[in-house]
Image (tube, rainbow, N blue to C red):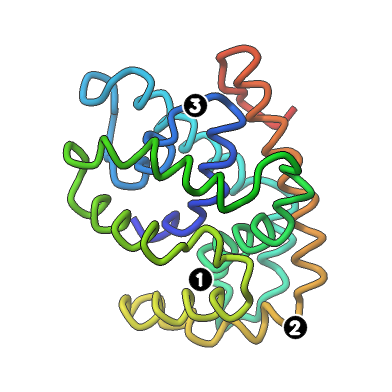
């Protein structure tokens, strides 16, 4: 459950690009098994898109190369840290990727789309949403200090992830290289989302 819990902004942005359910894509990590029949078809399709994106991201060469930048003492938790890092770069470069919609406006749009469905969603997901929107996480991902705070909080709350508490100096040291890896990864993710919007199909590999 903890391996894919922080790249909220990327999943919401890719869902919007794909014309997919924002609720399904954000909630996917809180849903086990087959979502069909348990949720409306659009939400179930969003959950499947989220899972496909995760699977393809894990095998992307840019992600493999990014993981290799980290030392042995933190490499085990580097995939979790990278989820936060990708959201950081997406927030930082938002206007380059979405010149016609500010990040604040996008966040408010996403909140308005998701909030009405929260009463019927899993309790942990409702708890996430209470903090996500109130504390403006999506906008604050652009701040390096917030990035560090997020990682330290995760380390404090989950003993198995304690290495996250001292991974930020490595992120700072490799910042330019990680930013380059983001620009190798994210355009591929956008192509996947646009393909899904155009065809209604989830590709098996990057296009």
User: Left of 167 or right of it: where is 24?
Assistant: left
Do tag 1 and tag 2 residues touch (Cβ < 8 Å)? no
Q: Position of residue 202 (x, y in %)?
A: 56, 22
Q: Nearer the viewer, residue 106 or 33?
A: 106
1 vs 3, front mark? 3
Residue 179 image point, x, y percent: 77, 63
Disc 2 versus disc 3: nearer the observer: 3
Nearer the observer, 54 or 115 = 115
Q: Give the residue drawn at x 56%, y 74%.
A: 147
- State whether residue 39 is above or below residue 106: above
> What is the spatial separation of the Cα atoms under label 2 and label 3, in whole angstroms?
36 Å
**Quarter of the image with the C terminus in it:** top right
Instruction: Give the mark nearer the N terminus: 1 vs 2.
Output: 1
In what element is the residue under mark 1? helix
Task: Determine which quarter of the picture holds residue 115.
Answer: top left
**Distance (Cα) linking label 1 and label 3:** 29 Å
Q: Which residue is mark 2?
A: 173
Graded by Cα atoms within 10 Å as few (under 14), some (14 to 19) or many (20 or more), the crowding at tag 3 reads many
Dot 2, how many residues are within 10 Å of its Cα: few (below 14), some (14-19), or many (20+)? few
Instruction: Answer with the quarter of the image where residue 93 lies.
Output: bottom right
Label 1 or label 2, whichever lies nearer to me, is 2
Q: Nearer the viewer, residue 172 or 72?
A: 172
Secondary structure at numbered mark 2:
helix
Q: Is residue 14 above or below residue 197?
A: below
Residue position marked by numbered label 3 in the rendering:
20
Residue beneath the point at 47% across and 74% down = 150
Q: CA distance from mark 1 to mark 2?
A: 17 Å
Q: Secondary structure at mark 3?
A: loop
Residue wearing tag 1:
77
Q: Residue 62 shows which numbered tag?
A: none
Residue plotted at (67% across, 76% down): 70
> Which label's residue is closer to the chain start, 1 or 3?
3
């Amino acid at each position: 459950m903890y391996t894919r819990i922080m790249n909220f902004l990327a999943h919401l942005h890719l869902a919007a690009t794909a014309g997919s359910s924002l609720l399904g894509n954000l909630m996917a990590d809180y849903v086990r098994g087959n979502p069909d029949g348990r949720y409306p078809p659009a939400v179930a399709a969003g959950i499947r898109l989220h899972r496909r994106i995760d699977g393809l991201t894990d095998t992307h060469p840019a992600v493999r190369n990014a993981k290799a930048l980290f030392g042995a003492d933190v490499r085990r938790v580097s995939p979790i840290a990278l989820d936060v890092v990708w959201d950081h770069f997406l927030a930082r470069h938002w206007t380059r990727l979405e010149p016609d919609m500010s990040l604040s406006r996008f966040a408010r749009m996403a909140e308005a789309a998701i909030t009405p469905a929260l009463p019927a969603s899993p309790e942990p997901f409702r708890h996430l949403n209470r903090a996500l929107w109130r504390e403006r996480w999506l906008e604050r991902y652009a701040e390096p200090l917030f990035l560090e705070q997020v990682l330290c909080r995760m380390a404090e709350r989950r003993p198995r992830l304690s290495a996250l508490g001292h991974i930020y100096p490595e992120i700072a040291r490799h910042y330019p290289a990680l930013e380059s890896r983001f620009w190798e990864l994210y355009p591929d993710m956008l192509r996947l989302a646009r393909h899904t919007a155009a065809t209604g199909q989830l590709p098996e590999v990057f296009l």
